[in-house]
Image: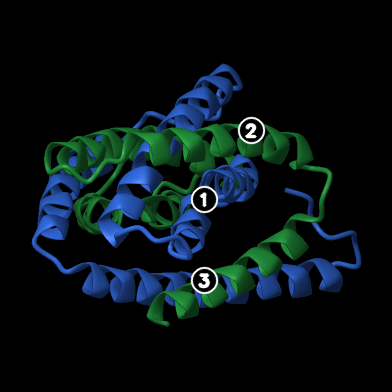
Chain colours: A blue, B green
Amino acid sequence: MNNWLLVLFGFLSGIIGGMGMGGGTLLVPLLSFLDMSQKTVQAINLISFLPMCIVALCFHSKNHLVQKQHVGWIIVPAVLSAIAGALLTQHTENKVLKICFGVFLVAVGIWQLVLSIKAMVQSKNKGSCPTKQ
Amino acid sequence: MKLDFKKIAILVCGGLFSGFVNGFLGGGGGVLIVTLLLWILQLQQKEAQATALLIVLPLTIVSAIVYFVEGNVSWTETLLTTLGVVAGGIVGALLLGKLNGNVVKLIFALVLVAGGIKMFL
């Protein structure tokens, strides 16, 4: 039963990820319904993201959508702090990690809610059809 | 496009923060990086989403290595979920452009808030 749920939850978040909206943010709360530690859930989220990321990156590179100029300013500090963050996870209780993830999701959710309502109002004001992504 | 010191400082600080979030929470850095690319580098939405993948990929690899070394990876569960994610990813890519982007975003935002609340319970 759990095996099918893993595939199903992966599938649902994959749809969101395939639409370019951050499927990982959906996968973590879904997997938290199953009996697994938060650290295991987070590891699944990281690894399951990799194949799709690589395929999508090849696809977007072909379409000249990937802009490499200046990104080094983000990548280098981000890689270093990602290692620090991942190491800190190992010294943090699962319960605390869950709460931190919850706070992050609610914050991002409200922020996205505001952005999408703004976009809807703007497209209505223009009197045209809502923009398709 | 030339960057001044202020913009470089924002990119470095934003990189530090999103990298930390991605490593500590096992995801979520992409949303922050897209915003940074739209705001500071003035990329178009699609360019920002594509470029964010290039940045998130190395972060995810190094974070995954730490989780693996520390013994947090259960391979069977990871493999099954990854199969689902890849299949869903193909469906999502096919659906892209066929649905109203704003409505999907709105539903997604509500799901995020609900998911976040679920994490507290």
Q: What residue type is labelled 2?
A: Ala
Residue closest to the eye, A126 or B66:
B66
Q: Residues within 10 Å of mark 1 (few under 14, many from 20)?
A: few
Q: What residue is at 44 percent from the left and 58 percent from the top?
A: A28
Marks 2 and 3, the one that precedes in the sequence: 2
Which circle, 1 or 3, is nearer the viewer? 1
Chain where mark 3 sits:
B
The mark lying in front, picked from 1 and 2, is: 1
Dot 2 corresponds to which residue?
B87
Disc 3, SS: helix
Q: Mark 1 lies on which chain?
A: A
Residue beneath the point at 62% across and 40% down: A18
Residue position for label 1: A2
Q: Distance between the residues labelled 2 and 3?
A: 22 Å
Identify the residue at horizontal 19%, vertical 35% (top origin): B65
Disc 1 and disc 2: Cα gap in Å?
Answer: 18 Å
Marks 3 and 2: in contact by CB < 8 Å?
Answer: no
